[in-house]
Image (cartoon, rainbow, N blue to C red):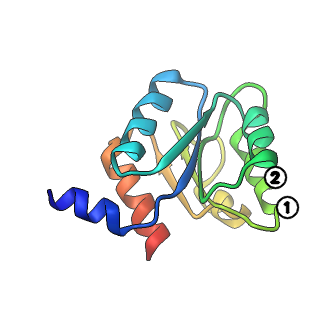
């Protein structure tokens, strides 16, 4: 019951999750939805950019390495936007240094594997605080 009260008290966010792994998209999408947020998904950076051109998002969570546009291309597009959503990176490797990602404008960087519950709670905590 307390969780329902908490969900009703917070602003419902629009979240875009970008990853080429359908299992990760499903898992993270369900976790954000459990917290009461609206979720869209994209299987590539290029598709994410197309969505960002048509719809506003509060949060973008993106994998780094993907076919058809990587996470850095998504971040650079977001940096060109007037109303920029908060951007979070997640990656399974060290394709790019964490410091570099943060200097490019990422809010936080998460290394995979990571608990979906922990990941979402950290993103929401950072967004609201």
Relative placement, left or right, of 54 versus 92 is: right
Residue count near mark 2 (Cα–Cα under 10 Å), binned few <14, some 14–19, many ≥20: some
Residue 89: percent from left, percent from top: 58, 50
Judging depth in this view, the residue of 6 and 129 nearest the camera is 6
In front of the other: 8 or 44: 8
Q: Is residue 38 above or below residue 126?
A: above
| Residue 84 in the image, given as x and y percentages of width and height | 72, 64
The residue sitting at 53% across, 43% down in the picture is 39
Labels 2 and 1 touching (C-beta < 8 A) = yes
- Number of numbered labels in the structure image: 2
* Circle 2 SS class: helix
Q: Is residue 92 above or below residue 52?
A: above
Point 44% across, 77% down: residue: 129
Q: Any mark on residue 80, and which?
A: 1
What is the secondary structure assignment of the residue under circle 1? Answer: loop
**How far is the residue under mark 2 from the one under mark 1?**
5 Å
Q: Foreground residue, 94 or 84?
A: 84
Q: What is the residue that sits farthest to the right in this orientation?
A: 80
User: Which quadrant is home to the N terminus?
Assistant: bottom left
Q: Which residue does the image show at 39% across and 36% down from the upper left?
A: 30
Name the image quarter holding residue 82.
bottom right
Mark 2 sits on what residue? 77
Q: Is residue 17 left or right of residue 79?
A: left
Q: Residues within 10 Å of mark 1 (few under 14, many from 20)?
A: few
At 75% from the left and 33% from the top, the residue drawn is 47
Q: Is residue 80 left or right of residue 14?
A: right
Q: In which image quadrant can residue 116 be found? A: top left
């Amino acid at each position: 019951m307390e969780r329902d009260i908490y969900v009703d008290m917070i602003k419902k966010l629009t979240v875009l999750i970008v990853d080429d792994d359908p299992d990760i998209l499903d898992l993270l999408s369900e976790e954000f939805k459990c917290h009461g947020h609206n979720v869209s998904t994209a299987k590539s950076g290029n598709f994410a950019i197309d969505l960002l051109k048509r719809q506003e998002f509060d949060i973008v969570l993106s994998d780094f390495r993907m076919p058809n546009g990587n996470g850095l291309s998504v971040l650079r597009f977001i940096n060109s936007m007037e109303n920029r959503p908060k951007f979070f990176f997640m990656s399974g490797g060290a394709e790019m240094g964490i410091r570099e990602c943060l200097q490019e404008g990422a809010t936080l960087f998460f290394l995979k594997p990571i608990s979906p519950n922990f990941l979402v709670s950290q993103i929401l905590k950072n967004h609201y605080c």
